């Protein structure tokens, strides 16, 4: 039996290794900011497998370095407007407004400001693309480089336009497109059990939640079309002809590498060219630096809490930081808190504040019992990978929605910063620490997440290489994206069949009427 | 670079092997006949990986042996009616009727006979299940055996009922369910680009083809409900309560191992718990027996044609066999023909007739240029695996539809037996032999089919083991199957929103009317 198992293992091994190492050329059009953190994982892996990677870089990019051992940068002489500072200020504004319970109008104004910023972002991307397309030398050199594929994050449409212009296959590193959550652009999404992010709904909705989901969907789709559509629409008509719909350019991508899997995402319809790579950034933890290891060990049986609110939120308003620090001080656990602000007055001896912390290595440490997070997917997947339950403090974007998914699985609680007090923070933290179900459920998720025939990153890279080997993935692309909505939904066919049915009914009723009249006349005559 | 590639390969290897070898217990409820040929591949692989497999066997099963080194048989003392002989006779009747161009009525009567036979088959399965459920000792022993999962072919519902009765997770080895093509039972299937098998339509349909697809779908679904539904409905109500819908019992399966992939199937929506294992039965060819190798080598540059029409069709009417043999005689190729009937008078020297042939080993031989097949999926996948183009002679069931998929990909031609003459046969065979596109396209399909991160059989077994390890695959199962159709399609939500819209419109019109009247009165007064 052992031999049989071994031979089966060996044969699977050889198959896994079998695909030939094809040293390809990948052109990357990234999205700046935190999205680049994800993209870089793919870029580095592609480079380590012998492929040459070129990254398009705006003149003022904050995250994408000009030089790197892993890629060559194509420096575009155009300032796309690095948005880091805006978002940082924006988030702190959101926190301030939420904490001060300002009027609904203030919150609405903030939403509008965010919308405008997105609008500007997409405008800038389009301008950058025009700038590139009009730079004949640049385009000539890109054409001559003979790339095998374009890898891009479809949260902006730059890479899509570039790929179509160069006639190259497209691979998406996706969670969002310019139209919202990526699945909604490619796969059927019955609104009865597929909640539209970031609605914070689950796949088990009551009637009124389903009504909310439907309204939310209608409003968001219109919003995306109004806000984002016009820019890309102009661009697609300008360079690809008056009949080219920019949405179908996106949908024609060869491969959608989705940064989720069904440990995190609710199960929903998908497509053959969607590959799930959720958790592709996760890796085993490394040993901690000595001072941290000593601190962690000093926690004893109570263990350690790790808190980090992502790169955008280095500090909090004083009152909020005070509340959180005070709550921590009451816990028997030790706390490691990534915080760049002024040291809160209420900070206890059990809490270590750090400018930066080795998050993955901490989460993988057996003494770490709880992760306090803003709810970004990177951190969430690291917590899932290491089986650490979460208390979430969502601030903005998809964070609350991400946490709602974990809540539905019984592995997290989320806090609202509007009314966050030390009592609420303490009670919630204690609940997740002391109720075994949170940790058990997270450990179960972790097991499911790790139990895959291939590592998510290996799978992602296999499929990028597949697209390069075969110049696309045409056999995985459904015909749907070529259809206008009324054909896709068979509206024309249904109307045609209803018309015929109505005609038949009409003829039949004429016939019955004639018969009736005939009988009636005869009866009258016979009378 | 080589080191990097090697280390990546090694890491992927360790991940592929990583899942622990969990020696599980699988209960198999197979479908007799050619479906067992497929199921046996999984059974043997599970056994070779150290799992113990038990197969439920009807007293009169033709294909499932009572004893096997790979499984233990649970002998149910019930004759389910082995249908082999019926189907053999039925197919020869179909051929006779099609060849003699008998009336449409004769063809319709034959269709009705087939429908009745399916009806009887499902009735028998249900009776067998009742027989098992009422055999308390048998059920007790099955319960005590503590199986980890039920593996079944959902073309009949026996395994589904058995699994629900025993409270076990279900894995399907599926292409058809009792409701038709398996995807239609689990995944959204927009009829605008998803043709319903066996309609012989492709994913690129004209308006009238889409109309046909819609009508075909409506009629077939009704037919399945009328023909098959009642039996299973009675059974589900009897054993699982009056509110249990038998369809949702099927839909609740944990995993759908589909015997297709997107080299053969048109790309279409799918679900997270659908795993594609098309071609799982394929394997490299072994050397031929000496006499065959000599015959194949004697073909020289012209190469060899292999013809086999599956297990059901060992012989053909004399006239048809004569036409085919005469056409073969005119070809420069050598022919190996699996044929059990009387030697046709027109047989040429270039044709070798055999009772049985090592199909996979022949198709894998570099000298084999063409496969003449009835269009069963086993043979088709072997041809895809080895890259050999096909001339199809479909007779019955899904064969014509299977071939239509290959036709759409430019790797096959199909012949109609109704008007098959030596001239047509010769011309078609010559076309596929001499036009390079058929072979090139098939070689491309073969490359795509083989370029997967895991062998289809390994993938199938990984996921069966996954279900055993985790007692199901709940996190991959969408909520859809728990919903009645009107909730699934949001009909209630849409009606609710339309009602509100109508009400608002009504209130608004009342308001406008009031205003109008008010203005009008004043005007009258002022006049």
Image (tube, coloured by chain):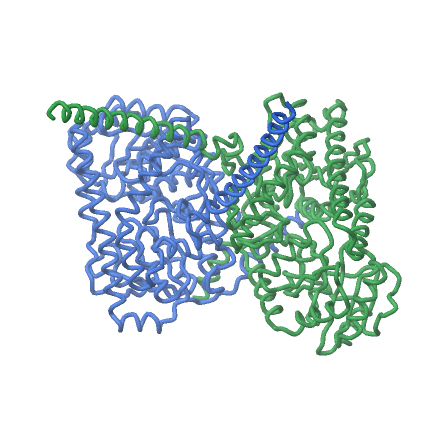
Chain colours: A green, B blue
The one of A318 and B452 positioned closer to us in this rendering: A318
Residue B438 drawn at (x, y percent): 41, 28
Asked if one can make out residue A15 in the rendered structure from this viewpoint, the answer is: no
The one of A443 and B486 positioned closer to us in this rendering: B486
The one of B200 and B367 positioned closer to us in this rendering: B200
For residue B195, side relative to residue B110 (left or right): right
Give me the residue at 75% from left, 63% from top. A420
Residue A406 drawn at (x, y percent): 62, 59
Residue A117 drawn at (x, y percent): 76, 39
Quarter occupied by residue B43:
bottom left
Residue A291 drawn at (x, y percent): 82, 70
Asked if one can make out residue B117 in the rendered structure from this viewpoint, the answer is: yes
Quarter occupied by residue B265:
top left
For residue A266, side relative to residue B94 (left or right): right
The one of B288 and B405 positioned closer to us in this rendering: B405
Q: Is residue A184 above or below residue A239?
A: below
Q: Quadrant of the C terminus of chain B?
A: top right
Count up the numbered dots: 0
Give me the residue at 42% from left, 56% from top. B252
Residue extending furthest bottom? A301
């Amino acid at each position: 039996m052992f031999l049989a198992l071994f031979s089966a293992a060996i044969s699977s091994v050889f198959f896994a290794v079998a695909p030939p190492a094809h040293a390809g050329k990948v052109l990357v059009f990234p999205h700046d900011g935190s999205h680049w953190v994800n993209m870089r994982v793919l870029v580095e892996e592609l480079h380590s497998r012998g492929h040459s990677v070129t990254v398009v870089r705006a003149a003022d990019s904050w995250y994408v370095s000009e030089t790197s051992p892993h890629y060559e940068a194509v420096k575009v002489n155009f300032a796309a407007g690095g948005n880091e500072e805006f978002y940082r200020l924006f988030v702190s504004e959101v926190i301030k407004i939420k904490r001060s319970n300002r009027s609904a109008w203030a919150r609405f104004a903030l939403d509008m400001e965010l919308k405008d910023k997105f609008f500007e972002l997409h405008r800038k991307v389009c301008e950058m693309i025009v700038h590139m397309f009009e730079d004949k030398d640049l385009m000539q050199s890109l054409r001559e480089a003979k790339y095998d594929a374009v890898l891009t994050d479809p949260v902006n449409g730059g890479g899509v336009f570039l790929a179509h212009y160069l006639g190259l296959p497209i691979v998406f590193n996706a969670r969002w497109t310019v139209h919202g959550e990526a699945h909604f652009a490619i796969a059927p999404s019955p609104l009865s059990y597929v909640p539209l992010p970031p609605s914070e709904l689950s796949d088990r909705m009551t009637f009124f939640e389903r009504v909310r989901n439907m309204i939310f969907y209608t409003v968001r789709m219109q919003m995306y079309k109004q806000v984002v559509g016009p820019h890309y629409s102009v661009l697609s008509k300008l360079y690809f002809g008056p009949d080219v719909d920019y949405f179908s350019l996106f949908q024609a991508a060869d491969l959608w590498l989705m940064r989720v899997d069904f440990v995190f995402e609710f199960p929903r319809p998908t497509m053959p060219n969607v590959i799930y790579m959720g958790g592709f950034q996760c890796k085993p933890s490394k040993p901690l630096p000595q001072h941290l290891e000593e601190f962690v060990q000093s926690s004893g049986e109570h263990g350690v809490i790790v808190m980090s609110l992502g790169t955008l939120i280095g500090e909090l308003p004083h009152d909020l930081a005070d509340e959180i620090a005070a709550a921590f001080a009451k816990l028997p656990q030790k706390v490691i808190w990534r915080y760049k602000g002024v040291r809160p007055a209420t900070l206890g001896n059990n809490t270590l504040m750090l400018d930066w912390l080795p998050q993955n290595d901490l989460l993988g440490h057996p003494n770490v019992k709880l992760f306090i997070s803003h709810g970004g997917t990177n951190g969430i997947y690291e917590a899932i990978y290491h089986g650490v339950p979460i208390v979430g403090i969502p601030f903005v974007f998809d964070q609350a929605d991400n946490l709602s998914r974990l809540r539905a699985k019984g592995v997290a609680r989320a806090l609202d910063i509007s009314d966050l007090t030390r009592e609420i923070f303490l009670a919630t933290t204690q609940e997740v620490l002391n109720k075994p179900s949170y940790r058990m459920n997270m450990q179960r998720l972790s097991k499911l997440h790790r139990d895959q025939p291939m590592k998510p990153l290996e799978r992602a890279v296999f499929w990028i290489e597949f697209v390069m080997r075969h110049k696309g993935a045409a056999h995985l692309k459904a015909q749907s994206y070529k259809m206008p909505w009324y054909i896709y939904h068979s509206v024309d066919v249904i109307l045609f069949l209803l018309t015929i049915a109505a005609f038949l009914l009409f003829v039949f009723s004429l016939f019955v009427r004639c018969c009736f009249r005939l009988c009636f006349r005869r009866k009258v005559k016979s009378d």
